Amino acid sequence: MNKKVLILNGSPRLKGNTKQMIDEFKRGAEDSGNEVTVFNLKQMNIHACLGCCKGGKNPDSPCVQKDDMEQIYPVYEQADVLVLASPMYYWSFTAILKAAFDRLFAVAEKDENYRNPYKETVLLMASEGDTEDNFKPVADYYHALLSHLGWKSLGEINAGGVFNVGDIDGHPKLSDCYNQGKSL
């Protein structure tokens, strides 16, 4: 069965290491017949969540803030797989990815019990550090988040040892990204 895949690119570098990981994942997913949509969050006008808990009243426009999240909401609701892609910033996602993810709560507000639509997820991350210990805080947060949401992780790929643009060229994790996308 072909899946609808949404990739949220949280990298501020539009031609950086994270983008190369996304490109390989996307290529693999499309080679398997899946439909893939990528949003480059850096190019979008997305404000931080207000914590107002006033969303969900309009099913077509769930958040009270009207910005570029309006483009993401319908794709998110239809997606089977959500890919969170980010370079590691202080042992976490980038702020732009976190802001967009927080804003997805407006969709949960459409449900009287604040349930998020079920998703399978993948985490793609580029990081300077190349140890399991370096990636652990991100992996712990990712797994805790999915546990609370009741979502399933299809995997996480951390391409460590990459800092400068292009450092990922020839990195073995790129083939992991392709294979992860192909496996959908």
Image (spheres, rainbow, N blue to C red):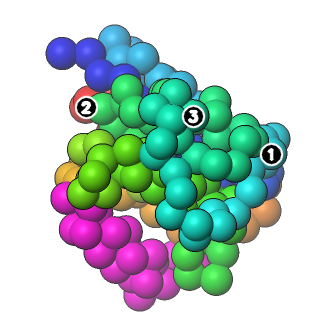
* Three-letter code for the amino acid on which mark 2 is drawn: Ser
Against 143, residue 12 (above or below) is above
Q: Which residues are magenta?
A: 125-150
Q: Find out whether residue 129 is within the magenta segment.
A: yes
Q: Is residue 18 visible?
A: no
Quarter containing the C terminus: top left
Q: Are marks 3 and 1 in contact (CB under 8 Å)?
A: no
Q: Which mark is residue 61?
A: 3
Quarter containing the N terminus: top left
Assess disc 2: are there few (<14), some (14-19) or many (≥20) residues with their C-alpha within 10 Å of its C-alpha.
few
Q: Are marks 2 and 1 in contact (CB under 8 Å)?
A: no
Dominant SS type (magenta): helix
Name the residue carrying label 2. Answer: 183
Answer with left or right where residue 108 lies relative to residue 99: left
In space, the residues marked 2 and 1 are separated at their CA atoms by 33 Å
Residue plotted at (26% across, 16% down): 2
Picture coordinates of residue 62 (x, y %)?
52, 41
* Three-letter code for the amino acid on which mark 1 is drawn: Asn
Q: Which mark is residue 18?
A: none
Helix, strand, or loop for circle 3?
A: loop
Q: Closer to us: mark 2 or mark 3?
A: 3
Picture coordinates of residue 45 (x, y %)?
80, 45
Using the image as rendered, state which of residue 65 and residue 176 is in the foreground: 65
Q: Is residue 77 visible?
A: yes
In space, the residues marked 3 and 1 are separated at their CA atoms by 16 Å
Picture coordinates of residue 140 (x, y %)?
34, 79
Q: Quadrant of residue 4?
A: top left
Reading the chain from its start, which is encountered first: label 3 or label 1?
Answer: 1
Name the residue carrying label 1. Answer: 45
